[in-house]
Image (spheres, grey):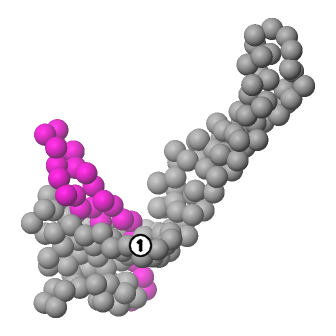
Amino acid sequence: MDEYAARLVSSDLDENEQLLWAGRPEPLTLAIVKSWPAAFGAAVFLGMGSIGFSFQGAAAGPVSFAILSGLALLAPALLVVGVALALIPALRFYQAQGTIYALTDERALVLVHFPYRTVSSIMANRIAFVRRRERSDGASDVLFAEHVNRAGEAGVLTGRCRRRAGA
């Protein structure tokens, strides 16, 4: 168990609640897993904005040039959206550094300290399953779900945590 994470979680525990496990996610893994749609969107918007800027002078002509000139008018907005989407992985990385996952005898907790402090918890009687997988590189995947649908798929909250020295 990550002792630093355990200390931070202790203030959020109820009086008789016992902490079973606490850990922090690998920031790079969390940033990649949760941000690939944003990275794809950033590529699309930046590409469309770049094409729009290349057709800034095409104000008259056939319909295709009219569409491209409309794209040229939207180019600054497309580039701004593209840059904003491109920043999401960096923000997720920073957010992961302040995220803690915890399992107690009463509930599962996810504490996030960026951009503001939030605590999400699922009570034990609502958790469909908890599973921890050890990986060969020393990381663990902790999976817990609040519900499982008819197809057997779970709405899973996951965290991959790196084992700390001495843990």
Asked whether residue 166 is drawn in magenta, I would say yes
Q: Magenta stretch mostly in which secondary structure?
A: strand
Give left or right: position of 81 versus 136.
Answer: right
Quarter of the figure with the C terminus: bottom left
Q: Hey, what amino acid is under mark 1?
A: Val
Residue at image position (35%, 90%) is 7
**Residue, x 24% and y 62% (percent of image)?**
144
Residue 126 or residue 1, whichever sits in front: 126
Quadrant, the N terminus: bottom left
What's drawn in magenta, residue-wise?
Answer: 142-167
Q: Is residue 143 visible?
A: yes
Residue at image location 23% in from the left, 85% down from the top: 13
Residue that carries the numbered disc 1 in the rendered image: 112
Any magenta on residue 55? no
Q: Position of residue 128 (x, y in %)?
A: 14, 58
Q: Quadrant of residue 110?
A: bottom left
Q: Secondary structure at mark 1?
A: strand
In this rendered view, identify the residue nearer to me: 142 or 89: 89
Q: Is residue 138 visible?
A: no
Whether residue 125 is situated above or below residue 145 in the rendered picture: below
Vertical arrangement, residue 97 with respect to residue 16, above or below: above
Q: Residue furthest right?
A: 57
Q: x and y percent of residue 109 in the render?
A: 28, 72
Relative horizontal placement of residue 124, taking residue 51 as reference (left or right):
left
Q: Quadrant of residue 17?
A: bottom left
- Whether residue 71 sits left or right of residue 131 in the image: it is right
* Residue at x-position 30% and y-position 69%: 120
